[in-house]
Image: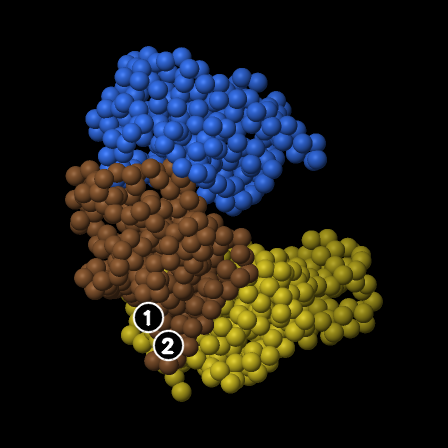
């Protein structure tokens, strides 16, 4: 089976020649979660709008669910679900009514509309609120309803454009669980985000976009490995023990820049697996440790390497989800 | 075709739903033509004394104007609502669903045509209560058809404007067209009593034929001679503006 | 106080001029109605009891001006309501300017808009053949009453905004503007009106304002209608300007 989403040289130029999207090549396999990561203004939303047939490409090609977006847009629309940046809802209708309308618009037989609607309402946890007007819903509830509407017709490909922007941490985590569930069910998910932690947690593969171009593409692990390996930051209790500690730890891997007082850093390609042996070795040598951090490269480090700038939002979603403090490993 | 019909029905229901959920928003549009009728007949009522005036009373003469004004307001409101939906992202949602563009358009236009019957009904009830003679079922039915068709025409125009400018700030542009179309006719006086320039404009304006078609039963009898021009004129208007609106719809997105 | 007031007036004017979707209807709709009324009903000047005029246009100019001035008042109200909704109003209140300047500045801008309205319709009238019987003096009288009425109607708009606090309520007032105007002698001589306009017109200040603006155009300057017009316009300014200040105090007092 071919790619679920495939673009070749996809381009969108606006009046004045400004290219919001400047030649993008993407291939997303069926059932994959693809994270499209980049700062505001990078071209994420423009790319999504072209893939969901809201905007005509000015160059290149794109195929979604096997159909060219420019030549067979209605076939594409039949097979995709879309939840855009603004949760576009009619505030005067109830949740149940909106889902019913969406089902009708997607050609779901009348006999099945109610049952399908009930199922989705239950799935996103809106049973209590379904007969209230959407205008009374919180931001998180509206986003969940938006997602339910995007899923009403069991799309092959789901587009989520910054689905957790503006949500509180709990709502964000709920949405992350839903995305994982969709992936387990075989739906292809194309997710744009400005939160690196979101891409890191959810995506099977990540494309990093900046200035309308993809600057890096691969699995999160591959991308991070490309900028350096994890390392251990060790804080000793006794500054005088630094030299001895270096000797003891020599067999585990290269030391990073020379120790400063009580601090030393050690490459740890094995990641978390390296922690226990190191601690044991220090302990056996009678060297007391005041602190130990495993520092992994982040997608922000990847972004910095390719663009020279940090990604906005780096650390925002991360703080919520409890990622370790960022460290510099091999910045350009 | 049936699926298109189902979609159109669902969109019409949604548009009508707004009236039920926020009646306050609909009230000005429903009341305005009646207010104009009462106000105009109170102010200019004496004009019916002019020799050559076709009706027994000025009120009788301008009731049809009020009916068409209701159609114009409703049509413009359809465009304003679409502009609002575009601004809020709801229209994108309709665009990415597989329903054909023509279904989306018919849903908008159909709801405008049906909604136009509200101000018309209110206006007629008030007019009859104020002493205007019952013009006959044929007049009312013909009036309903012409009102709905004109509402569909103005809604199509307003949709073109909404798709072009994508903002509610374009509302006056939508409203002024209906205003001009309905009033630059034989709205206030028969052609014989008008200034020459307005007589020329009214002759060129196809809505004059529509107005005369609605008016005939109020000032006399309904005849085929006065009916067919109205039907032809309104059919032409609906076709032209409907096609323009369809073109506008097709140009949105892919 | 003066400096703050002038600065706010300047700002209000600038914003009005930058919002064509508010400004245009204020001039366009009354102009269209003027054309339609004049073109459709010009023969009514032949009705028994109709005052001596050079043409129906001369008679209708005052009505068009009053209508546009009323719409200007609604525009001022909507602009004020938008400021309240958007939070800028709170910023003004929190600044060290006299509170009254907030209202007075807006009213000054309304007065300038009023002068614009008068200029537009006098020009349109002259271009299409109207004559100002009162000459230069007559024109000045028209400006005086027009600007005063503009300020008064602006005060009504500001009062509505301070009480309603949201723009869509103020916008909903729009049809009522027409109702009140119809129930006056703005569009047609008082003696020829039908019910219910005939008896309401005598009590409607808009009748006197319109008659006051009209007299210099169709008749020359005569004391009674002009003085009544000035008094009616000034009355609107005093009453609604005062109520606006009270509403402002009430709003600030409520916190």
Q: Are marks 1 and 2 in contact (CB under 8 Å)?
A: yes
Residue on which disc 1 sits: B102
**C115, above or below A199, in the image:** above
As drawn, the chain in brown is B
The colour scheme is by chain
Left or right for C99, reference A310: right
* Image quadrant in which the N terminus of chain B is located: bottom left
Q: Residue B210 is drawn in which quadrant?
A: bottom left
As drawn, the chain in yellow is A
Mark 1–mark 2 Cα distance, whole angstroms, equals 8 Å
Nearer-the-camera pick, C203 or B3: C203
- Which tint was used for chain C? blue
Residue on which disc 2 sits: B4
Q: Secondary structure at mark 1?
A: helix
* Image quadrant in which the C terminus of chain B is located: bottom left
Give residue A228's position: percent from left, percent from top. Answer: 55, 66
Q: Can residue C81 be seen at all in this image of the molecule?
A: yes
Q: Residue at x 30, y 71 (%)?
A: A70
Q: Which mark is residue C116?
A: none
**C82, above or below B8, in the image:** above
Q: Residue at x 31, y 15 (%)?
A: C220
Q: Residue at x 37, y 81 (%)?
A: B2
Give residue B92's position: percent from left, percent from top. Answer: 42, 64
Mark 1 is surrounded, within 10 Å at the Cα level, by few (under 14), some (14 to 19) or many (20 or more) other residues, namely: some
Q: Residue at x 50, y 60 (%)?
A: B19
């Amino acid at each position: 089976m071919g790619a679920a989403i495939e673009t070749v040289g996809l381009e969108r130029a606006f009046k004045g020649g400004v290219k919001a999207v400047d030649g993008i090549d993407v291939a997303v396999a069926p059932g994959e979660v693809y994270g499209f990561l980049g700062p505001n203004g990078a071209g994420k939303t423009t790319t999504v709008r072209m893939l969901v047939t809201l905007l005509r490409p000015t160059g290149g090609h794109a195929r979604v669910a096997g159909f060219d977006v420019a030549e067979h847009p209605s076939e594409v629309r039949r097979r995709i679900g879309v939840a855009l940046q603004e949760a576009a809802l009619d505030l005067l209708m109830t949740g149940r009514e909106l889902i019913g309308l969406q089902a009708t618009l997607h050609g779901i037989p009348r006999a099945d509309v109610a049952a399908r609607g009930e199922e989705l309402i239950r799935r996103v946890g809106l049973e209590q609120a379904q007969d209230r007007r959407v205008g009374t819903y919180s931001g998180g509830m509206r986003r969940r309803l938006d997602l339910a509407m995007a899923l009403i017709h069991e799309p092959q490909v789901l587009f989520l454009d910054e689905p957790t922007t503006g949500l509180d941490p709990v709502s964000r985590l709920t949405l992350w669980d839903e995305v994982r569930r969709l992936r387990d069910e075989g739906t292809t998910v194309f997710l744009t985000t400005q939160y690196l932690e979101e891409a890191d947690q959810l995506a099977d593969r990540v494309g990093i976009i900046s200035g309308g171009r993809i600057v890096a593409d691969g699995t999160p692990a591959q991308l991070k490995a490309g900028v350096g390996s994890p390392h251990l930051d060790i804080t000793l209790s006794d500054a005088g023990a630094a030299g001895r500690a270096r000797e003891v730890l020599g067999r585990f891997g290269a030391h990073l820049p020379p120790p400063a007082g009580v601090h030393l850093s050690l490459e740890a390609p094995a990641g978390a697996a390296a922690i226990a042996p190191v601690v044991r070795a220090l302990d056996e040598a009678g060297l007391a440790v005041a602190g130990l951090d495993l520092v992994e490269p982040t997608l922000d480090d990847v972004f910095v390497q390719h663009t020279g700038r940090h990604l906005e939002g780096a650390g925002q979603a991360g703080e919520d989800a409890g990622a370790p403090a960022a460290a510099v490993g091999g910045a350009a | 075709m049936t699926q298109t019909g189902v979609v159109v029905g669902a969109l019409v229901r949604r548009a009508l739903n707004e009236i039920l959920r926020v009646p306050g928003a609909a009230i000005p549009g429903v009341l305005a033509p009646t207010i104009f009728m009462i106000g105009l007949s109170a102010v200019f009522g004496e004009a019916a004394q002019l020799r050559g005036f076709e009706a027994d009373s000025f009120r009788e003469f301008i009731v049809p104007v009020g009916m068409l004004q209701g159609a114009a307001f409703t049509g413009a409101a359809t465009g304003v609502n679409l502009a609002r939906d575009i601004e809020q992202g709801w229209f994108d949602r309709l665009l990415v669903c597989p329903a054909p563009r023509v279904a989306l358009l018919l849903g908008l236009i159909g709801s405008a045509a049906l909604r136009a019957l509200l101000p018309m009904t209110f206006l007629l009830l008030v007019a009859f209560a104020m002493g205007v003679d019952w013009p006959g079922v044929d007049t009312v039915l013909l009036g309903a058809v012409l009102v709905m068709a004109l509402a569909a025409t103005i809604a199509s125009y307003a949709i073109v404007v909404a798709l072009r400018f994508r903002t509610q700030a374009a509302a006056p542009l939508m409203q002024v067209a209906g205003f001009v179309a309905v009033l630059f006719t034989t709205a206030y006086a028969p052609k014989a009593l008008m200034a020459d320039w307005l007589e020329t404009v009214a002759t060129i304006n196809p809505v004059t034929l529509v107005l005369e078609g609605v008016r005939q039963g109020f000032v006399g009898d309904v005849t085929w001679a006065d009916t067919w021009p109205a039907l032809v004129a309104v059919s032409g208007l609906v076709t032209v503006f409907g096609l323009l609106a369809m073109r506008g719809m097709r140009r949105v997105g892919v | 106080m003066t400096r703050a007031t002038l600065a706010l007036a300047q700002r209000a004017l600038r914003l009005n001029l930058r919002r064509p979707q508010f400004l245009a209807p204020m001039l366009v709709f009354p102009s269209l109605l003027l054309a339609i009324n004049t073109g459709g009903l010009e023969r009514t000047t032949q009705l028994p009891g109709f005052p001596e005029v050079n043409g129906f246009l001369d008679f209708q100019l005052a009505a068009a001006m009053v209508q546009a001035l009323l719409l200007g008042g609604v525009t001022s109200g909507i602009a004020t309501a938008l400021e309240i909704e958007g939070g800028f109003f709170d910023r003004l209140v929190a600044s060290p300017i006299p509170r009254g300047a907030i209202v007075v500045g807006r009213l000054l801008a309304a007065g300038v808009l009023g002068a614009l309205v008068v200029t537009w319709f006098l020009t349109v009238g002259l271009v299409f053949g109207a004559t100002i019987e009162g000459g230069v003096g007559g024109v000045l009288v028209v400006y005086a009453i027009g600007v005063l009425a503009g300020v008064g109607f602006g005060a009504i708009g500001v009062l509505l905004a301070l009480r309603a606090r949201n723009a869509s309520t103020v916008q909903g007032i729009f049809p009522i503007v027409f109702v009140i105007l119809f129930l006056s002698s703005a569009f047609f001589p008082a003696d020829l009106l039908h019910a219910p306009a005939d008896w309401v017109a005598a009590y409607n200040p808009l009748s006197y304002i319109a008659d006051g603006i009209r007299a210099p155009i169709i008749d020359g300057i005569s004391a009674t209608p002009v003085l009544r017009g000035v008094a009616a316009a000034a009355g609107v300014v005093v009453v609604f300007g005062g109520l606006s200040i009270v509403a402002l105090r009430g709003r600030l007092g409520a916190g």
